[in-house]
Amino acid sequence: MELIPNLLDDVARDCLLRSSYQQYPVIASVCRAWNREVSLSQFLHQRKASRHSQELLILSQARVDPAGSGKIIATPEYRISVLESGSGLWTELPPIPGQTKGLPLFCRLVSVGSDLIVLGGLDPITWQAHDSVFVFSFLTSK
């Protein structure tokens, strides 16, 4: 099956390689062939080799007062922020399901391929230890 009808797969793959990481959830949902293509580790290697991958800086940041005063909230809520170094664009990842008060305190963040892993930490309200593992996929934005 062709990635894009009436277009050589090499040309279609080159188009996919040039897409921003923020477009991958949409690309992956277009069809099974595109989802399969962008999910391959070989695709990620080709993207890096062709110099079309974006460098991302992932940070755990205290959330600022939503009222706009710029002050940090009394009990800070930590969220995951992403800086795309080439464009200077900042985005915030969606909160972890069931974690309404932000990231677990003292959790660990590690990237594996196109996934971000959040490991353990302490509940910010009860201070109970978490043994949970959360995975965020940059391909699906979930």
Image (cartoon, rainbow, N blue to C red):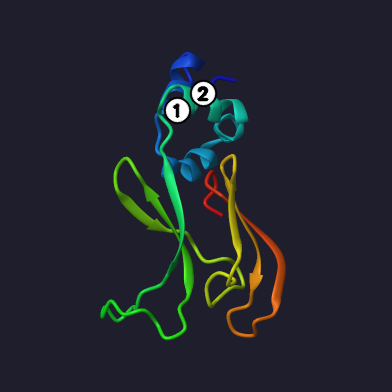
Discs 2, 1 touching: Cβ within 8 Å: yes
Where's the N terminus, which quadrant? top right
Q: Secondary structure at mark 1?
A: helix
Name the residue rendered at 34%, 78% in the picture.
66
Name which residue type carries label 2.
Gln
Tell me how many marks there are: 2
Residue to which mark 1 is pinned = 17
Above or below, 127 against 89 in this view is below
Above or below, 133 against 36 in this view is below
33 relative to 8 in the view: left or right: right
107 relative to 7 in the view: left or right: right
Q: Secondary structure at mark 2?
A: helix
Residue 119 tag number: none
Q: Position of residue 35 (x, y in %)?
A: 58, 36
Mark 1 Cα shell of 10 Å, populated few (<14), some (14-19), many (≥20): many
Choose between 114 and 74: the one closer to the eye: 74
Of the residues under marks 2 and 1, which one precedes in the sequence? 1
Image depth: mark 2 or mark 1 in front: 2
27 relative to 37 in the view: left or right: left
Q: Position of residue 7 (x, y in %)?
A: 45, 16
Residue to which mark 2 is pinned = 46
Q: Position of residue 21 (x, y in %)?
A: 44, 41
